[in-house]
Image (spheres, coloured by chain):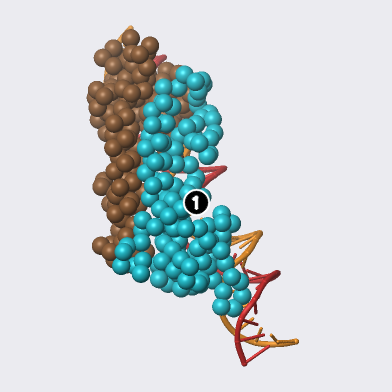
Chain colours: A brown, B cyan, C red, D orange
Amino acid sequence: MMSKKCKYALKALTRLAKNFNKGHLQTADIARLENIPKKFLEQILLELKHARMVGSKQGSGGGYFLIKNPKEISVADVYRLFDGAIALLPCVSINFYERCEDCTDEKSCAMQREFIKIREGARKIMSKVTIHSFIKDSDSQ
Amino acid sequence: MMSKKCKYALKALTRLAKNFNKGHLQTADIARLENIPKKFLEQILLELKHARMVGSKQGSGGGYFLIKNPKEISVADVYRLFDGAIALLPCVSINFYERCEDCTDEKSCAMQREFIKIREGARKIMSKVTIHSFIKDSDSQ
DNA sequence: ATATACTCTATCAAAATACTAGAATTAAAG
DNA sequence: CTTTAATTCTAGTATTTTGATAGAGTATAT
């Protein structure tokens, strides 16, 4: 399961993607349209900004806009930003590697080989689905 | 990431699988061999028993033993038991379906279709990896 | 100047996670 | 039949994570 934060981020990004290259949207509007608590969404958009997926315009009449092409923001990217590793075990994670404390000898661990396969399966499909995949033809006009 | 509980369960099942059809193993021994806190492991083995993956013999000289073939216990089965849904969103889960509160109209949700694909990818590979996959040739003797 | 909207940090309640404790039950063995 | 050793079961607990909310600060259009 992904966190609500991550799901909200994907929905906000999708909303911004529908408006790609057409100016900016305000937090309050995205929050209302997507049923996301406004103050929570502020945090999320700020994190997305720090991750350079969105840009912002401050002050009265400001808002947020996508700065990356929707086809270049994958579910994997957003998942890693908010929920961390895609791998099921820390010891097989590419981006969030950590030793398993209970593991005496990592090299002879028979689980690693299999969990690398699972990670690769998840990683590939989550990398292939992008924000653009969420935009239906009727919306992309 | 899977929980430690789930990881411990997989390790305990693997240990029992190496002893499949060769009598039973005690909690204390599995705990020592796999570096799992004993009291925590007791809980886990009990849950595995209730799920009819392992059987037990009570009293002095008792212990646990596998009752399913190691090839018929998949990572997906164990994951669902301890960590719940494999799907990333509750609304696309087969075994743990729940409505997304923030979703106004599930039928027109553009995210569902893609998250079903992700679920299927994860589900297939996690179903294919079994406890038997964790037993190296040198151990299976 | 003022209203408006993003920026940033702190706080908080509830839930989940990772355990621990201890009493009850069962069964083998002397 | 009593002791010992093992599973069974429920409850509790500390820590971390999650899902928010609060409010002060900063920037900018009008």
Residue A48 image point, x, y percent: 31, 31
The chain to which mark 1 is attached is: B
Is residue A74 toward the left or the right of residue D7 in the image? left
The relative height of residue A13 versus residue B138 in the rendered view (above or below) is above
Closer-to-camera residue (B35/A52): B35
Please say whether residue A137 is visible from this viewpoint: yes
Q: Amino acid at mark 1?
A: Phe
Please say whether residue A3 is visible from this viewpoint: no
Please tell me which residue is depicted at 44% across the width and 47% down the height of the picture.
B76
Closer-to-camera residue (B16/B71): B71
Closer-to-camera residue (D2/B119): B119
Closer-to-camera residue (D15/B87): B87
Location of the C terminus of chain B by quadrant is bottom left
Residue B14 image point, x, y percent: 41, 62
Is residue C14 toward the left or the right of residue B127 in the image? right
Rendering quarter of residue B4: bottom left
Residue A18 image point, x, y percent: 34, 16
Please tell me which residue is depicted at 61% across the width and 71% down the height of the picture.
B58
Is residue D3 toward the left or the right of residue B5 in the image? right
The relative height of residue D23 versus residue B73 in the rendered view (above or below) is above
Which residue has dot 1 on it?
A: B82
Is residue B27 toward the left or the right of residue A60 in the image? right
Please tell me which residue is depicted at 41% across the width and 36% down the height of the picture.
B119
